[in-house]
């Protein structure tokens, strides 16, 4: 296994450049203190790319991304681009990146750090130790199905049409991602568990989803536990008893809704990373769940931890550097336990720090880990 890795860095808009600077800081530290080395290609996406290239994602930037092992991204968007053409808005660059790189599986962890347990709106005993991974199908379903559009019926009425469509291959490939992740998350004492969610009771696409997931499980993943749940019941159960879940796999629409609901269980949206993956061996895109927060850009208030944790996900899922990913995640936990906070997660008796200082604290925690190991 090579210890050298090639990454493309896309800071994006708003607070993107600030939080990405802290990821670079972590990468520099890793190169000086571990056997890892990196080649970094940096470019623009979103509004920054529109200002520079006239498009939210240039073909040249896309080729850099495809040639890398992973893409680490900040966030896109801002009010200064609200009035540009729809296909040139910052968000269009992100959609193009996902489509062209064939990223069909979106991974959204819902992880509650012990030090932030009081930030959740649910009782501490409900969310303590929560560690859910939602796998959302990203390129199919009602957001992309045809026919779609708004039509004039000619009698003062209009009709809006969106079509929910899934084919077996789309279900199987995202199912394989979910089952494989559950298998890796399993332990000697407790095997991994997948909860597949749809609306098989009222939707033919949901019936197909359930049948195909069941067949895939029997053929390739019988060592992983599989259960099925209607998506609306899953939303209720996330609030009632979230610890029953390990990996949840679902379609594009339900995944959009359920991942946001699960994220808020943690009480700290600014702490959550995400990954968008394609076929094995192809580069994934890793980005924080939070937005570009243009209202605080340049003020040193942004929380870089979600982006750092996104980089940790890249180490784990694209670079096969699981040990280093765990070290970074543990360092984040350690910093939070010290009571070090950016404004978005500030609490009583904690110390408020800047974006840069949070990055420095993270480096300090990793240095302590290295010294203990020595």
Image (spheres, rainbow, N blue to C red):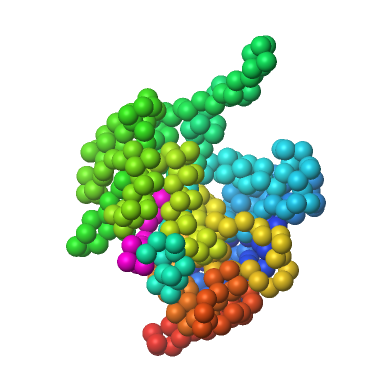
Give the farthest residue toward the top: 154
Q: Whole-percent x and y of residue 256?
A: 49, 44
Front in this rendered view, residue 251 or 130 = 130
Find residue 238 and report its horizontal and vertical position in percent.
37, 51
In the image, taking residue 17 as reference, residue 67 lies left or right, namely: left
Q: Is residue 349 visible?
A: yes
Q: Nearer the viewer, residue 28 or 151?
A: 151
- The answer to which quarter of the image holds residue 294 is bottom right
On the rendered image, what quadrant is the N terminus found in? Answer: bottom left
From the viewer's perspective, is 270 left or right of 202?
Answer: right
Range drawn in magenta: 124-134
Residue 163 image offset from top left, x and y in percent: 51, 25
Tell me what residue is drawn at x 79 percent, y 43 percent.
83
Residue 60 in view of the camera: no
In the depicted structure, whether residue 264 falls above or below residue 160: below
| Residue 126, magenta (yes or no) | yes
Residue at 69% from the left image edge and 52% from the top image edge: 77
- Which residue is depicted at the point 46% across and 27% down? 165
């Amino acid at each position: 296994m090579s210890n050298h890795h090639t990454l493309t860095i896309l800071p994006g808009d708003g607070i993107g450049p600030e939080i990405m600077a802290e990821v670079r800081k972590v990468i520099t530290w890793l190169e000086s203190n571990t056997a890892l080395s990196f080649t970094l290609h940096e470019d623009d996406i979103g509004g920054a790319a529109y200002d520079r290239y006239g498009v939210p994602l240039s073909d040249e930037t896309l080729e850099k991304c495809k040639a890398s092992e992973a893409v680490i991204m900040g966030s896109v968007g801002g009010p200064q681009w609200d009035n540009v053409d729809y296909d040139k808005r910052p968000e269009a660059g992100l959609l193009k990146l996902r489509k062209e790189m064939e990223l069909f599986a979106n991974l959204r962890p819902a992880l509650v750090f012990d030090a932030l347990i009081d930030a959740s709106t649910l009782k501490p005993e409900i969310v303590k130790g929560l560690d859910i991974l939602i796998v959302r199908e990203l390129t199919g379903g009602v957001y992309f199905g045809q026919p779609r559009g708004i039509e004039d019926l000619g009698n003062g009425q209009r009709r809006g049409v969106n079509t929910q469509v899934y084919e077996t291959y789309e279900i199987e490939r995202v199912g394989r991602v979910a089952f494989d992740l559950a298998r890796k998350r399993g332990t000697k004492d407790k095997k991994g568990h997948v909860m597949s969610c749809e609306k098989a009771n009222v939707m033919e696409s949901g019936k197909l989803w359930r049948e195909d997931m069941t067949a895939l499980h029997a053929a390739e993943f019988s060592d992983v536990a599989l259960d099925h749940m209607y998506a609306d019941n899953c939303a209720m159960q996330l609030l009632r008893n979230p610890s029953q879940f390990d990996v949840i796999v679902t379609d594009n629409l339900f995944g959009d809704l359920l991942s946001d609901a699960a994220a808020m269980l943690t009480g700290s949206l600014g702490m959550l990373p995400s990954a968008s993956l394609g076929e094995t061996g192809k580069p994934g895109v890793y980005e924080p769940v939070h937005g570009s927060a243009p209202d605080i850009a340049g003020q040193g208030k942004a929380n870089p931890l979600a982006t750092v944790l996104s980089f940790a996900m890249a180490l784990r899922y694209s670079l096969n550097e699981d040990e280093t990913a765990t070290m970074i995640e543990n360092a984040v936990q350690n910093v939070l336990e010290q009571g070090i906070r950016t404004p978005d997660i500030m609490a009583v008796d904690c110390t408020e720090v800047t974006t840069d200082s949070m990055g420095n604290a993270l480096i300090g925690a990793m240095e302590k880990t290295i010294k203990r190991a020595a």
